[in-house]
Amino acid sequence: MSQAKVEKYKKEKANRKKVLAQNKAKRLAGRICAWVILAAVAGWAGYSGYRYYESKKPAETFYADLSPVSDYLNALNTEAE
């Protein structure tokens, strides 16, 4: 083995823990970014689906016959006069 190869091996061995820690940190950062992107896409899809569902839902309309209330109020007005 030549002296250059020996020196290279010693440098690699000396920095092995540092290089492994950097690789581990990069993998962790990549996983975190992937999860954040996945959560954002899932949230967007859920929100869009909910908006689509709500837009297709028929509007509820209530009809009430208020003539008895009007009659009662008219009766109160006539008694007051």
Image (spheres, rainbow, N blue to C red):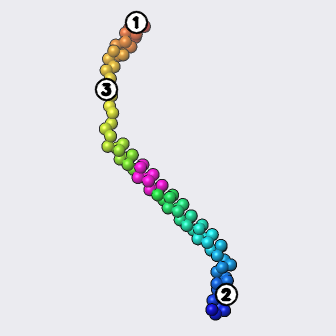
Q: Residue type at mark 2: give it.
A: Glu
Q: Quadrant of residue 64?
A: top left
Sequence order check, earlier mark of 2 and 3: 2
Residue 79: mark: 1
Q: Nearer the viewer, mark 3 or mark 1?
A: 3
Element under disc 1? helix
Q: Identify whether 31 is placed above or below 69.
A: below
Front one among 16 and 34: 16
Q: Position of residue 12 (x, y in %)?
A: 64, 80
| Pointer 1 local density, CA inside 10 Å: few below 14, some 14–19, many at least 20 | few
Residue 66 is a magenta residue = no
Name the chief secondary structure element in magenta. Answer: helix
**Residues at marks 3 and 1, CA–CA distance in whole angstroms:** 30 Å
Q: Nearer the viewer, mark 2 or mark 1?
A: 2
Residue 63: mark: 3
Q: Identify whether 30 is placed above or below 74.
A: below
**Residues at marks 2 and 3, CA–CA distance in whole angstroms:** 90 Å
Element under disc 2? helix
